[in-house]
Image: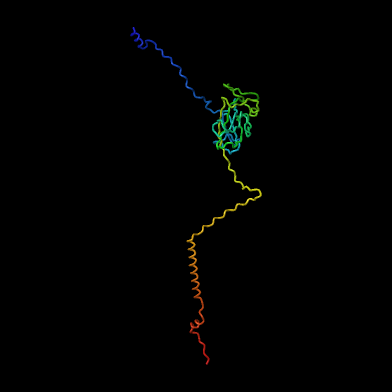
Amino acid sequence: MLGAALLLLLLPGACPVHPLPTLPVPPFPGTPGPWLRRPLFRLELSDAEDAFPRLGGPLEVPADSRVFVQAALARPSPGWDLALHRCSVTPSSRPAPGPALVLLRGGCPADASVTFLPPPPPDSARPARFSFRLRPVFNASVQFLHCQLSRCRRRLGAGRIARPRPLRSPLPQCLPPVEACAGNGESLGTNGPHLHTLTQPIVVTVPQPLPGPPKSLPGKAVRAQTPAPAPAPAALGPAPVVALVLAAFVLGAALAAGLSLVCAHSASPPPGQQARASPSSPQPRRPQ
């Protein structure tokens, strides 16, 4: 009996075989969508108000000069705009707590040199623009501007607000800087799920001062600088001096000998020798 049962189990198709239940495999985490790979904001720097966009590498400006900042959405949208929360300049490339020159706090100027630029025409992308003076606070040749930005709901006309697709946490309404800093609108915090921090480097140069005139003390006239005297020629050694003296002595002796010979040949003979030397001359006759 037992053998017959085993034979039935071994025969194919004798009884249906049900597969064991398998556990569901968790789905592989999908890659982020295209909306996550695209940048949401754009932060640009320039040394002039109307020089956006600026081509080239990092901005290079002298110390204590004005820097112009422009922040905008990477892809303009009719229902969204951006809001600046906090901007600061630090000597570090990371926006970590530490020494910083705070420019904006809560969307409002925190430094006396910050000036919001006039908004562009309504039909444009409406970037947020401001300027500040890069004061020589840090002794670093490369400094970094960190800005916290977020999206906000754009106004459509007077009292109308765009109705974008609902998010998990609603975004605040866009307000002009003057109205936002007056305390009549929503305050912009520094923490939130929709805050993004962008960083831009700034190369700081130190201009070399021009050489000025010499400072004069009161009651004393400034003397004109006289040119330095030319260096005196080097003195000769004893050997050349002795050679020159001997040469001068020999030359003097030769000149003296030559003069004496010339004088000896050109001198006239005595009277007695002159009479003897002329026998052909007639002799005077004696009187008889």
For residue 96, what is the image quadrant?
A: top right
Closer to us: 202 or 242: 242
For residue 64, what is the image quadrant?
A: top right
For residue 170, what is the image quadrant?
A: top right
Q: Residue furthest top?
A: 1
Q: How far across and down, in percent of the image, does residue 58 sit?
A: 55, 36
The N terminus, quarter of image: top left
Colour scheme of the rendered structure: rainbow
Q: How far across and down, in percent of the image, does residue 140 sit?
A: 55, 37
Q: Residue furthest bottom?
A: 288
Closer to us: 138 or 182: 138
Q: How far across and down, in percent of the image, does residue 19 sit?
A: 41, 14
Give the vertical position of 177 relative to 207 (above or below): above
Closer to us: 280 or 33: 280
Q: Is residue 46 left or right of residue 242?
A: right
Give the vertical position of 36 relative to 219 (above or below): above
Q: How far across and down, in percent of the image, does residue 196 sit?
A: 56, 28
Q: How many marks?
A: 0
Give the vertical position of 32 relative to 240 (above or below): above
